[in-house]
Amino acid sequence: MKKELEISCPEITFRVGLGLDVHAFAEIGGRRGLVLGGVDIPFERALLGHSDADVLAHATADALLGAAGLEDIGHYFPDTDERYKDANSMNLLRKIRALVAESWRIANVDAVIICERPKIRDYRDAMRKNLSQALDINTAQVSVRGTTTERLGFTGQSQGVAVQAVCLLENRQR
């Protein structure tokens, strides 16, 4: 992967990034079901997307890229490129981590999954484990939570899932 922007600023110790991703629900078709944080969740619908539509992995990737001052995930893995059709988003997240790790160390990642259904409580630990492995950090450095929008809006009407993620990066040069 090519870096368009090189952030070389040794006087900056930390940078914060925010990622947001949203995917609509679709009927389950083919081999893909609902995947969040690399976890296959039993549910009557899947998320619509070019890759596996893992909104948790995508929002986390954008948080890392934003903190590092790089382009968004669509720049590196465009939905117009057939190489990424049905791609495993955890593998894409590993590639983003490698790109960011050239200059930055991940201090932590915090993500909130916004949906009415499915309830993610029983899957959070597996999501945290998968994210920590993909990011090559300790599970204690990853937080995954769920919330609803009290039946308001896109997610509240169970039309899809949104995720917001934030990360803190520490400069490797310091």
Image (cartoon, rainbow, N blue to C red):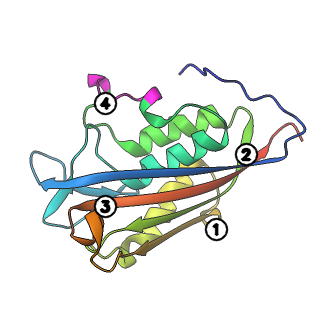
Amino acid found under the numbered disc labelled 2: Arg
Q: Which residue is mark 1?
A: 140
Q: Which residue appears at 10% of the width and 45% of the height?
A: 30
Residue 56 rendering spot, x and y as whole percentages = 42, 55
Circle 4: element type: loop
Q: Which residue is mark 2?
A: 105
User: Of callouts 3 and 2, which one flags the residue occurring earlier in the amino acid sequence?
Assistant: 2
Q: Which residue appears at 32% of the width and 69% of the height?
A: 115
Q: Which residues are magenta?
A: 75-83
Circle 2: element type: strand
Image vertical order of residue 135 relative to residue 113, above or below? above
**Residue found at the very far front of the displayed protein:** 153
Of circles 1 and 3, the one toward us is: 3
Q: Which residue appears at 50% of the width and 62% of the height?
A: 129
Check if residue 81 falls in the magenta segment.
Answer: yes
Amino acid found under the numbered disc labelled 3: Val
Quadrant assignment for the C terminus: top right
In three-dimensional space, the C-alpha distance between marks 1 and 3, rounded to whole angstroms, equals 25 Å
Q: Which residue appears at 64% of the width and 60% of the height?
A: 138
In three-dimensional space, the C-alpha distance between marks 4 and 1, rounded to whole angstroms, equals 32 Å
Label ID, residue 79: 4
Callout 4: 10 Å neighbours few (<14), some, many (20+)?
A: some
